[in-house]
Image (cartoon, rainbow, N blue to C red):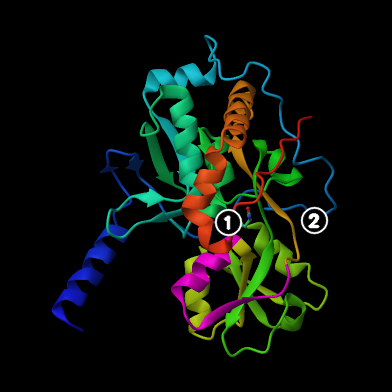
Amino acid sequence: MTRTRLALVSAVALLAGLTACTDTPRSRETSAAEATVTPETPASPAAPETCDARASFRPTKGLTMPAGSHMRTIRERGRLILGTTQDTLLFSSRDPFTGRIEGFDVDMGREIARAIFGDPGKLEIRVVPRATRVDAVKNGDVDLAISTMTTNCARWEQVDFSTVYFEAGQRVLVGKDSAVTRIEDLGERPVCAATGSTSLDNIGKVSTGPVPVARADFGQCLVAMQLGEVDAVSTDDTILAGLAAQDPYAKVVGPRFTSEPYAIAVGKDHREFTEFVNAVLERLRADGTWKSIHDRWLKASGPAPAPPAAKYR
Ligand code: GLU
């Protein structure tokens, strides 16, 4: 390894370890214990959906911030606290050169900060593992979680969700020379997904019986595949695109076999804040901001589709 390459690798390793207190002009980050923990609740229901998880609260007061609202509390605090991951390329991942966590999900958080403060930089990012993100919102450790997170009825029992801001679906990542063409081809073989993701549950529901193998995050699933510990990784196509971009010997195969509508998780005690977030999403859909964020991060996947329409309960 050349000295320059070695220096670069060390710098990347150093930055990857910098999860605490990185002050940047664009956003602030604080502590983040990454651990393999079991979530208190399953990521998706065992039974069929019992609610309309896509339907959220109508933003009746628009972008106003009445006295006593959670928006006022956030404004008085001086920053919005966002929970997200740091390893989801294109949605929320750490840029090794700047040390900042960036992506589609982070830009959504920045737009909510802009609506509260008139300044998208008033955002504190806390890195929260998938396994504990629902609890982090529930316990008030973060104001919201924007984290490639599917809205579903099991999670609605713990937290509230905004309207849907992105439509994803689960597919499969295998080695370039694999003969697998869809998830069913992996019957009785080990397939990896992150703890606390709906992906792990979905693998277990496939009729041919692939064996779900849990790792703390999807980066570790990719490593497990590279080491031959699992035959495939299966999760949202958004996340798989980011993994495939990191490994020239991997490919994404098969159709979407689930629907994963992403929404923003907010605490159940701040319904007015969920309504406010929905008002922000209305603005992003209508004024072209959603499209420019899509173009910024996901241009490689083709032209931006229409943003998902809002549905209210
Ligand atoms: N969207 C799925 C979920 O919310 C999988 C990706 C993830 O865990 O972030 O569980």
Residue 110 screen position, x and y as percent: 44, 36
> At label 2, which amino acid type do we have?
Ala
Above-or-below relation of 254 to 195: below
- Residues 54 and 310: in front is 310
Look at label 1 and name its amino acid.
Thr
| Crowding at mark 1 (Cα within 10 Å: few <14, some 14-19, many 20+) | few
Q: SS of the residue at dot 1? A: loop
* The CB of the residue at mark 2 lies under 8 Å from ligand 1: no
Residue 178 image position (x, y, % from top left): 62, 88
**Can you identify the residue that label 1 sits on?**
38
Residue at position x 47%, y 48% from top? Answer: 128
Can residue 215 be seen in this snapshot? Answer: no
The C terminus - image quarter: top right
Relative vertical location of residue 74 with respect to residue 131 in this rendering, above or below: above
Q: Up-down: is 81 above or below 21?
A: above
Q: Residue at x 75, y 61 (%)?
A: 258
The furthest residue to the top? 67
Which is nearer the N-term, disc 1 or disc 2?
A: 1
Q: Which-is-in-front pick, marks 1 and 2?
A: 2
Mark 2 residue element: loop
**How far apart are the two marked residues, 1 and 2, measured between alpha carbons?**
17 Å
Please state the extent of the stretch shown in magenta in the rendering: 238-255
- Image-quadrant location for residue 16: bottom left
How far from the left and from the top, in percent, is residue 147? Answer: 54, 48
Residue visible at 37% across and 31% down in the picture: 122
Q: Which residue is mark 2?
A: 46
